[in-house]
Amino acid sequence: MDNYLDLLKLILPEFLINHFDLVKNTKSGEVMHLYFEERNVTPKEEASRALIAHGFHKQVTIQDFPLRGNTVYLHVKRRRWLDKTTNKVVQRDWGLVAQGTRMTTEFAAFFKEISRY
């Protein structure tokens, strides 16, 4: 199983493999959709707080690098927790989408780099 995860880390953004579960995938023609949900692991920086799982944020769709001639869309659902003491919502701050785009930061950096030539 570890070899499988190591291979996925080469293909997909590593943070997805480390912190999210692939819950569904579909392929229609040359378009691939991969659906991820954040694991129910509370943020380490919030370990001192009494947190309970409190659902997900609205799903975000991000275009990623093409794979084997297929357009790839990542559908990501971020988790949120509720602090039982203060009733405030707690979440991780993921830099999933490059600012001003609908692409992963890695994919946007790739386009930025090749546009220099």
Image (cartoon, rainbow, N blue to C red):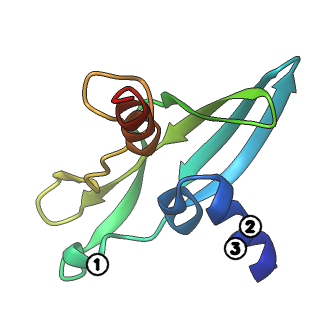
- In the foreground, 105 or 51: 105
Residue extending furthest toward the front: 117
- Look at 44% across and 70% down and name the residue there: 41
- Look at 32% across and 35% down and name the residue there: 98
Q: Name the residue under label 1.
A: 44
Of marks 2 and 1, the one in the foreground:
2
What kind of residue is marked 2?
Leu
Image mark count: 3
> Which percent across, then down, holds residue 73?
62, 29
What kind of residue is marked 3?
Asp
Q: Do the residues labelled 3 and 2 touch (CB within 8 Å)?
A: yes
Q: Distance between the residues labelled 3 and 2?
A: 4 Å
The numbered dot on residue 7 is 2
Up-down relation of residue 65 to residue 20 (above or below): above
Mark 1 Cα within 10 Å, few/some/many (few <14, many 20+)?
Answer: few
Which type of secondary structure does the marked residue at label 2 adopt? helix
Q: Name the residue under label 3.
A: 6
Of marks 1 and 3, the one in the foreground:
3
Quarter the C terminus occupies: top left
- In the foreground, 114 or 68: 114
Q: In this view, does 41 lie to the left or right of 2?
A: left
Residue extending furthest toward the top: 29
Q: In this view, does 27 lie to the left or right of 101?
A: right
Quarter the N terminus occupies: bottom right
> Which percent across, then down, holds residue 93?
25, 52
What kind of residue is marked 1?
Lys
Mark 2 Cα within 10 Å, few/some/many (few <14, many 20+)?
Answer: few
Q: In which quarter of the image is residue 49?
A: bottom left
Q: In this view, does 101 lie to the left or right of 49?
A: right
- In the foreground, 42 or 14: 14
> Which percent across, then down, holds residue 7?
74, 67
